Image (cartoon, coloured by chain):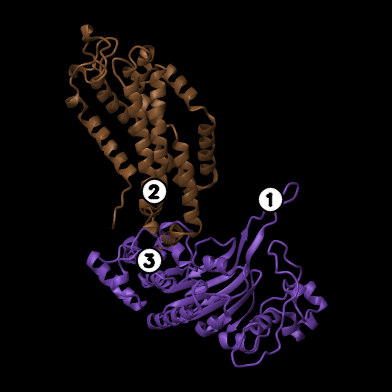
């Protein structure tokens, strides 16, 4: 049984209300189905505004889905703010993009890491102290940093502190929303490596949301590529990122600089970045797609499984099927 | 931690400590009763202006000792102003948190009350309430407690919404904390410095408001006395016996100034990132 299962989940936000016009609603996430297995890592990639973060919040039950269902460990996700929901927080945690904003700047690092233990009533004061010391060592923070306030830490140290807090209750699922994009490149590698080590040592399932394909490829078992709220390609990380089938994934992959190799052919996307309030007809990607054919503007391609186990939502990836249709 | 206290702030602290001590010990310190008449010594000037040490700050038109009345007035005014400020801060912050937590119609109602309070000239509201319900010290304090609550509500609501949207409060919430823990344990300490500064700005206003209402004869009623009450009744003798009016006026000015100075300085001290 999968640890986390999303079934045709959608999240709609009311749009800007205009005079004499109906408010256009924005479908930030539109009919996403996926599963996360215990102990595995799912990478979610896509450009800014494609609904990655909203999907992460839906996975954690921080927001209720407008349509569809989220299941964690075989049971439906309780509504946010209920006691059952609060209790479930001990089993799933979020790692934030901005660690300084996620920490209470008036409290010391040690007290913040102990906070989830206090909230969920785990251990007595002495046990908590020992646990905090252990967590600090696990994430590579020295004991001397325990008494510091967040603003007296470096960016990498803050993110380690946030991670230690997230790991305090031994969660089964960790959603990392752009966990390293605010850090220096040199620190990024350290934090990512530590994240992978901790995940493997503890058997945590991880959802890694990022726009950095290199990092995603390094940490993920499988990858889902999102465009305008929908998954356009999904499958094993090595396959999807090494031999992409969807034109959008191809464009993303071709934009990753590779050291030592002289420029491959780069696919540069033309046209405007997509506006989720005014979704193009048919395949949402067709206005920017270099290989679009007329059918793309009329029919929305469903996400269909390929022979090698991955799924792609593109008419051209399934030529036989669509010609018949 | 080093406490580099500027001279002006130390002076303000010293003055407030003195005022506070007077407020607590007024009944012990005062040499005479506030209603003790000494008709043979009416309008005696203070020491240095022709008066003697028997009445160090002179006497008023009924021969009551100004120093004794001043001490008791400080006690009364401070009690009212402190009570009113606390009521306003607690009530306003609570309403702000209610609005930020529930949003929706609860927030609309709070905001409506805030706008109503902000658009209503408070003096007129106070006058009508006192005119209808009569005057008692408790009612008067509670009424002044309504003054300025909307500022705390606005501040608390805005900062709590910001913290809920993307900051530390959202992080604590997704750790599974109860709302009480989020608001009292995290949001309140984080916004306390802003609220305290707001309180130090409104405390002098409450003192002035109390003085104003007492001056108009609607606040503290004789035989009780307050700083504003003393100013009000001393007005008639401004030319012949200015000390009746000037001594409480000086106390009002110095106290409000001291609280303002202290508040400014506290704001910087309470912010851990500025240390």
Task: Using the rendered view, name the quadrant where residue B225 is placed.
Answer: top left
Q: Position of residue A136 (x, y in %)?
A: 33, 74
Q: Quadrant of the C terminus of chain B?
A: bottom left
Q: Position of residue A182 (x, y in %)?
A: 51, 71
Q: Quadrant of the N terminus of chain B?
A: bottom left
Query: Chain for mark 1?
Result: A
Q: Position of residue A285 (x, y in %)?
A: 72, 74
> Label 2: which residue?
B267
Please report the residue visible at 44 percent of the width from the left and 83 percent of the height from the top.
A193
Circles 3 and 1 in contact, beta carbons < 8 Å = no
> Label 1: which residue?
A17
In front: label 2 or label 1 = 2
> Label 3: which residue?
A152
Image height of A139 relative to B126, above or below? below
Q: Secondary structure at mark 2?
A: helix
Please report the residue visible at 39 percent of the width from the left and 57 percent of the height from the top.
B274
Sequence-wise first label, 3 or 1: 1
Task: Please indicate whether residue B154 sits to the left or right of residue B233 in the image.
Answer: right
Residue B220 appearing in the image: no
Query: In this orientation, which residue lies closer to the viewer: B135 or A16?
Result: B135
For disc 1, the neighbor class at 10 Å (few under 14, some 14 to 19, many from 20) is: few
Chain B colour in the picture: brown
Per the model, the C-alpha gap separating discs 3 and 2 is 20 Å
**As drawn, which residue projects farthest toward the top?**
B40
For disc 2, the neighbor class at 10 Å (few under 14, some 14 to 19, many from 20) is: some
What label does residue A184 carry, if any? none
Task: Using the rendered view, name the quadrant where residue B12 is placed.
Answer: top left
Task: Using the rendered view, name the quadrant where residue B53 is placed.
Answer: top left
Give the letter of the purple chain: A
Query: Chain for mark 2?
Result: B
């Amino acid at each position: 049984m999968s640890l986390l299962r999303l079934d045709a989940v959608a999240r709609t936000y009311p749009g800007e209300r205009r005079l004499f016009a109906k408010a256009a609603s924005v479908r930030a996430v539109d009919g996403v189905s996926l599963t996360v297995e215990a102990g595995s890592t799912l990478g979610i990639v896509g450009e800014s505004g494609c609904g990655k973060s909203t999907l992460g919040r839906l996975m954690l039950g921080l927001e209720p889905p407008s349509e569809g269902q989220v299941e964690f460990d075989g049971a439906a996700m309780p509504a946010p703010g209920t006691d059952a929901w609060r209790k479930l927080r001990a089993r799933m945690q979020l790692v934030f993009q901005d660690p300084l904003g996620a920490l209470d700047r008036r409290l010391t690092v040690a007290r913040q890491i102990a906070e989830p233990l206090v909230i969920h009533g785990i251990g007595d004061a002495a046990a908590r102290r020992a646990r905090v010391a252990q967590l600090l060592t696990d994430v590579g923070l020295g004991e001397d940093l325990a008494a510091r306030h967040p603003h007296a830490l470096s960016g990498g140290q803050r993110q380690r502190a946030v991670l230690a807090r997230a790991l305090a209750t031994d969660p089964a699922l960790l959603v990392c929303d752009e966990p390293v994009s605010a850090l220096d490149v040199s620190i990024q590698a350290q934090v990512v490596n530590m994240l992978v080590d901790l995940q493997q040592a503890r058997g945590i399932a991880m959802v890694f949301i990022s726009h950095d394909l290199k990092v995603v490829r390094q940490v993920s078992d499988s990858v889902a590529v999102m465009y305008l709220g929908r998954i356009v390609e999904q499958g094993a990380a090595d396959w999807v990122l090494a031999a992409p089938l969807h034109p959008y994934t191809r464009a993303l992959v071709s934009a990753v600089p590779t050291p030592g190799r002289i420029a491959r052919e780069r696919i540069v996307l033309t046209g405007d970045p997509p506006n989720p309030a005014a979704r193009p007809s048919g395949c949402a990607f067709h206005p920017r797609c270099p290989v679009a054919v007329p059918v793309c503007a009329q029919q929305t391609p469903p996400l269909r499984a390929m022979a090698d186990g991955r799924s792609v939502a593109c008419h051209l990836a399934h030529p036989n099927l669509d010609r018949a249709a | 931690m080093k406490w580099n206290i500027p001279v002006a702030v130390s002076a303000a602290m010293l003055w407030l400590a003195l005022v506070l001590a007077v407020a607590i010990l007024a009944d012990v310190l005062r040499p005479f009763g506030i209603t003790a008449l000494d008709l043979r010594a009416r309008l005696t000037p203070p020491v240095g202006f022709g008066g003697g040490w028997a009445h160090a700050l002179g006497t008023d038109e009924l021969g009551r000792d100004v120093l004794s009345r001043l001490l008791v007035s400080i006690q009364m005014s401070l009690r009212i102003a402190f009570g009113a400020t606390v009521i306003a801060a607690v009530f306003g912050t609570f309403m702000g948190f209610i609005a930020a937590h529930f949003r929706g119609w609860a927030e609309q109602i709070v905001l409506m009350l805030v706008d109503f309070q902000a658009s209503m000239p408070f003096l007129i509201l106070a006058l009508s309430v006192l005119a209808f319900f009569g005057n008692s010290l408790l009612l008067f304090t509670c009424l002044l407690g309504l003054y300025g609550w909307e500022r705390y509500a606005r501040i608390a609501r805005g900062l709590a919404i910001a913290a809920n949207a993307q900051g530390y409060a959202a992080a604590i919430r997704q750790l599974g904390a109860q709302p009480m823990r989020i608001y009292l344990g995290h949001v309140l300490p984080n916004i306390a410095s802003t609220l305290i500064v707001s309180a130090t700005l409104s405390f002098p206003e409450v003192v002035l408001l109390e003085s104003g209402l007492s001056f108009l004869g609607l606040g503290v009623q004789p035989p009780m006395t307050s700083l504003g009450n003393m100013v009000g009744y001393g007005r008639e003798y401004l030319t012949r016996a200015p000390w009746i009016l000037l001594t409480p006026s000086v106390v009002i000015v110095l106290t409000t100034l001291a609280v303002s100075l202290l508040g400014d300085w506290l704001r910087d001290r309470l912010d851990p990132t500025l240390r």
